[in-house]
Image (cartoon, rainbow, N blue to C red):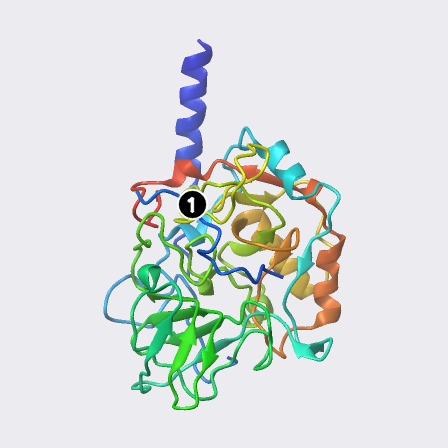
C-alpha cells in the first residue's frame, strides 16, 4: 500500500510540475582543473522574455525555450532526501548574498556583465587552455567586450556574448584580450538559444558545472517588470565529486555525500515571508521560490548570480541578505528529466 501511495504521489507531482510556457563570488579555479568526473551589456540589444518565442527560426530570440529546464517551475517538486545534509554542507546559518548590482565594490564592478552584439559582429580567434572541452572559435567578441570584474580583474573573468541576431550565446572563462584583437581563455562554450542541447557528459563550459551562465543570471529588466522566469545560478564553498542533471561536470576531489553535487537544485521555502522585500529583491526571491537556484560553481555560500547593470539598486538588493541557508531546501529535479542528454523537461 505504501508503495502504491508513493507512486501515486510521484505521478501527482509530475502532473502539477514541469516547465513553464509563459510569455514573459565564484572560485577562480579553472572549471576543468579539479574535475575527475567520468565522461558519459550592458548591451544595446535587449533580450526577449524567455518564453516569448518557440524554438524555431522565426520570432524574437529567447534565452532558451520555455520547455528548457532553466524555466521549470519547481515550486511543487518533492524535497530531495539529502536536502538537510546539502543545506548544512553549504551553510545553514550562512546568509544569501546578491553577487551582482550597480556601481563599484572595492573599486571594481561586480556581477557578470553581458555584452550584446549587433548582427554581423566580426568573429575573432580564441585559444583555450582547456581546448579539449571547449567549443572552437572564432567568437564574435568586440574590442570593448566587458569582462567580469573589469579589465584588471584577477578572478573568473567571464565574458558573456549575446548575439540575438544569430540567437546564440558565447561564453568564456578566464578571458584575456590579445593586442591583435584575438583572445585567450581557460575554456569556452557556444549555445544555441533556441535549442535544448547539453554539453557532452563530463565536459566543462565557462562554468564549473558545465552549464550555460546566461540563463542563470538575474537581470535588472526582469526585476523591473516584476517577474524573473528562470532559475538563478549560485555557488557553494565545497561540492562533491559528482554532478546531476542538467549539469555535465564536477569540480571537486571530495566523495563526501553530505556535500551537494554540481547541478543540485534548491528553492526558497514557501513559508519564507518576502512580502516586505523591496521590489527588486522581491522579484529575485519569488524566482527562488518558483524556479529555484542551480548550483553551478565553487565559491562563497549562497552567492546568487546576476548581471552587472547600473539599473540595479544595491539598496533594494540588500533585502536578499536577510535570507540564510535554513530558508532553502533541495528538490528532486530528476522528475523533470525526459532525456539525460537534453535540457528539455516535462511539460
Q: Quadrant of the C terminus?
A: top left
Image quadrant containing the N terminus: top left
Query: Which x, y percent locates residue 81?
Result: 54, 28
Q: Is residue 103 visible?
A: no
User: For this rendering, which residue is in front, 56 or 239?
Assistant: 239
Q: Secondary structure at mark 1?
A: loop
Residue 188 place in picture, x, y as percent? 38, 67
Where does label 1 land, which residue? 36
Residue located at (59% from left, 68% from top):
155
- Please give the name of the residue rendered at 41% of the width and 55% of the height, measured from the top-left corner: 210
Question: Hey, which quadrant is residue 284 in on the image?
Answer: bottom right
Few, some or many residues within 10 Å of mark 1 (<14, 14–19, 20+):
some
Q: Nearer the viewer, residue 239 or 307?
A: 239
Frontmost residue, 310 versus 272: 310
Residue 28, how many percent across, how many down?
A: 57, 63
* Residue 341 sits above or below residue 304 on the image: above
The answer to whether 23 appears left or right of 291 in the picture is left
Give the x, y percent position of residue 237.
63, 49
Residue 251 horizontal side relative to residue 274, left or right: left
Q: What residue lies at 29% left-to-right and 75% top-to-bottom?
A: 166
Q: Is residue 269 left or right of residue 121?
A: right
Which residue occupies 40% across, 34% down?
14
232 or 269: nearer the viewer: 232
The reply to whether residue 8 is visible in this rendering is: yes
Amino acid at each position: 500500500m505504501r508503495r502504491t501511495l508513493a507512486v501515486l504521489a510521484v505521478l501527482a507531482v509530475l502532473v502539477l510540475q514541469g516547465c513553464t510556457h509563459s510569455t514573459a563570488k565564484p572560485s577562480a579555479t579553472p572549471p576543468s582543473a579539479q574535475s575527475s568526473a567520468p565522461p558519459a551589456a550592458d548591451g544595446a540589444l535587449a533580450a526577449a522574455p524567455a518564453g516569448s518565442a518557440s524554438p524555431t527560426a522565426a520570432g524574437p530570440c529567447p534565452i532558451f525555450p520555455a520547455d528548457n529546464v532553466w524555466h521549470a517551475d519547481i515550486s511543487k517538486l518533492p524535497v530531495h532526501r539529502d536536502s538537510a545534509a546539502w543545506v548544512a554542507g553549504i551553510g545553514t546559518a550562512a546568509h544569501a548574498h546578491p553577487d551582482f548590482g550597480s556601481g563599484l565594490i572595492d573599486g571594481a564592478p561586480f556581477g557578470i556583465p553581458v555584452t550584446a552584439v549587433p548582427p554581423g559582429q566580426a568573429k575573432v580567434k580564441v585559444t583555450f587552455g582547456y581546448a579539449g572541452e571547449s567549443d572552437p572559435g572564432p567568437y564574435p567578441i568586440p574590442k570593448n567586450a566587458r569582462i567580469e570584474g573589469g579589465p584588471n580583474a584577477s578572478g573568473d573573468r567571464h565574458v558573456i556574448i549575446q548575439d540575438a541576431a544569430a540567437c546564440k550565446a558565447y561564453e568564456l572563462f578566464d578571458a584575456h584580450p590579445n593586442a591583435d584583437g584575438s583572445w585567450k581563455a581557460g575554456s569556452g562554450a557556444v549555445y544555441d538559444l533556441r535549442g535544448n542541447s547539453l554539453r557532452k557528459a563530463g565536459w566543462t563550459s565557462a562554468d564549473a558545472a558545465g552549464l550555460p551562465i546566461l540563463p542563470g543570471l538575474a537581470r535588472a529588466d526582469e526585476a523591473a517588470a516584476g517577474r524573473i522566469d528562470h532559475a538563478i545560478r549560485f555557488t557553494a564553498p565545497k561540492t562533491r565529486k559528482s554532478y546531476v542533471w542538467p549539469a555535465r561536470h564536477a569540480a571537486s576531489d571530495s566523495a563526501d555525500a553530505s556535500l551537494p553535487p554540481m547541478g543540485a537544485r534548491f528553492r526558497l521555502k514557501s513559508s519564507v515571508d518576502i512580502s516586505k522585500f523591496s521590489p527588486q529583491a522581491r522579484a529575485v526571491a519569488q524566482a527562488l521560490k518558483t524556479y529555484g537556484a542551480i548550483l553551478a560553481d565553487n565559491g562563497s555560500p549562497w552567492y546568487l548570480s546576476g548581471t552587472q547593470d547600473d539599473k540595479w539598486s544595491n539598496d533594494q538588493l540588500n533585502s536578499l541578505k536577510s535570507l540564510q541557508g535554513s530558508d532553502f531546501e533541495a528538490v528532486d529535479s530528476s522528475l523533470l528529466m525526459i532525456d539525460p542528454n537534453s535540457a528539455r523537461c516535462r511539460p
